[in-house]
Image: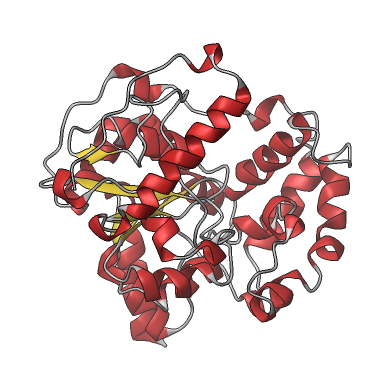
């Protein structure tokens, strides 16, 4: 089938009905040609407010990383599409719909393409769905200091007028009630979409260990590459070079623009940056919470600081099997200590 050529158009000059109709036509074309479109080479699974958007668009600057279909260069779109939330919110749309978002296989020789949906890490069904549908995909994960992540998540909701509670402390206090039963309902009713679970889980989404463990139950450790957001922002070139190598690509120079964060909402300017809330969140990160399991340190910038205050961090699992799995994952260079700590823990259990 011959590819269709699309002409770049100024989006602002088109009526919304025309834009909507055009999107429908393009998606229909993508679905019609879905048999000629392979799925993702990689999934960027989170974390929400963890730097995944900035990382994804930095990766797109690599000449061997392709954007999703249709490209913003060909249609009246402000930016390339980052992700389509297939394995969390849109799974009922089906595999043909999902593959319609990827470039034709004939255009992908020597290149890779992936999508990033930050809810994938936290969604209880996403890992199993992805393992069933795209078992060979590489898994990328960027993690941010969970305290800063929680503040940023709340700040984003307030900025978008989507959070009615006017202090972060109140939102934390309400979280358990808001999330009560939501995890189980998502599992028992696969088509159920929970706003509270995705958007009001300020503390819970930063409890990374059980969420990563769930993904590692479905994908082998060698298909994971995990990095700290702080390390990415400190040296985007080095971080992206590591990912390129992990994806089987040669490193390539990135433009200076990748140092500018996408969707920035610094928590340091949030009036809810209360020491009491910070201490409470730190204590949650260092102790078991019900069935979610214990937390332990990733050798990341925030956990290195936290350990100076006798605070445990995030990812080292407390079972020998989980520890062996974590030890086999690909970590960015500052995080190599997590492998040693995991191996030591496995040997001692």
In the rendered view, would you say 225 is above or below 25?
below
Q: In the picture provided, is 305 more to the left or to the right than 80?
A: right
Q: Is residue 336 visible?
A: no
- Give percent across and percent down for residue 249: 14, 45
Which residue is situated farthest in the bottom direction here?
A: 349
- Pick whichever, 274 or 75, lies toward us: 75
Residue at 17 percent across and 46 percent down: it is 108
Residue at 41 percent across and 17 percent down: it is 9
The colour scheme of the drawn protein is secondary structure
Q: In the picture provided, is 231 more to the left or to the right than 90?
A: left
In the rendered view, would you say 145 is above or below 197?
above
In the rendered view, would you say 328 is above or below 269?
below
Quadrant for the C terminus, please.
Answer: bottom left
- Give percent across and percent down for residue 107: 16, 43
| Number of numbered discs visible in the structure rendering | 0
User: Residue 123's quadrant in the figure?
Assistant: bottom right
- Give percent across and percent down for residue 104: 23, 48
User: Residue 219's quadrant in the figure?
Assistant: bottom left
In the rendered view, would you say 142 is above or below 90?
above
Residue at 38 percent across and 39 percent down: it is 56
- Pick whichever, 163 or 20, lies toward us: 20
- Give percent across and percent down for residue 299: 41, 54
Q: Is residue 129 visible?
A: yes
Residue at 59 percent across and 73 percent down: it is 294
Q: In the picture provided, is 199 more to the left or to the right than 212?
A: right
- Pick whichever, 205 or 78, lies toward us: 78
Q: In the picture provided, is 251 more to the left or to the right than 223?
A: left
- Pick whichever, 144 or 162, lies toward us: 162
User: Residue 49's quadrant in the figure?
Assistant: top right
């Amino acid at each position: 089938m011959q590819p269709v050529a699309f002409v770049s158009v100024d989006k602002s000059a088109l009526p919304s009905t025309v834009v909507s109709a055009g999107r429908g036509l393009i998606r229909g074309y993508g679905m019609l040609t879905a048999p000629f479109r392979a799925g993702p080479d990689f999934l960027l699974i989170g974390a929400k407010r963890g730097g995944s958007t900035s990382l994804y668009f930095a990766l797109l600057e690599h000449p061997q990383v392709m954007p999703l279909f249709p490209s913003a260069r060909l249609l009246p779109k402000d930016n390339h599409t980052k992700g389509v939330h297939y394995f969390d919110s849109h799974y009922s749309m089906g595999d043909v719909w999902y593959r319609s978002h990827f470039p034709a296989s004939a255009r992908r020789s020597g290149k890779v393409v992936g999508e990033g949906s930050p809810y994938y890490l936290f969604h209880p069904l996403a890992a199993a769905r992805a393992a069933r549908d795209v078992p060979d995909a590489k898994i990328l994960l960027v993690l941010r200091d969970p305290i800063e992540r929680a503040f940023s998540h709340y700040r984003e909701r307030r900025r978008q007028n989507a959070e009615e509670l006017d202090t972060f402390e109140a939102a934390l206090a309400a979280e358990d009630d808001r999330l009560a039963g939501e995890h189980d309902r998502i599992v028992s009713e696969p088509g159920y979409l929970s706003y509270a679970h995705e958007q009001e889980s300020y503390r819970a989404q930063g409890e990374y260990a059980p969420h990563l463990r769930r993904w590692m139950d479905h994908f082998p450790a060698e298909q994971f590459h995990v990095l700290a957001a702080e390390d990415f922002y400190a040296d985007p070139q080095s971080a992206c070079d590591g990912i390129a190598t992990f994806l089987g690509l040669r490193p390539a120079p990135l433009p200076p623009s990748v140092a500018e964060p996408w969707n920035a909402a610094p928590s340091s300017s949030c009036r809810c940056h209360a020491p009491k809330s910070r201490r409470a969140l730190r204590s949650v990160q260092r102790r078991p919470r019900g069935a979610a399991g214990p937390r332990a340190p990733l050798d990341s910038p925030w956990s290195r600081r936290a350990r100076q205050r006798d605070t445990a961090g995030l990812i080292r699992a407390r079972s020998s099997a989980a520890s062996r799995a974590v030890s086999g994952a690909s970590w960015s260079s500052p995080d190599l200590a997590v492998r040693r700590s995991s191996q030591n823990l496995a040997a001692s259990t």
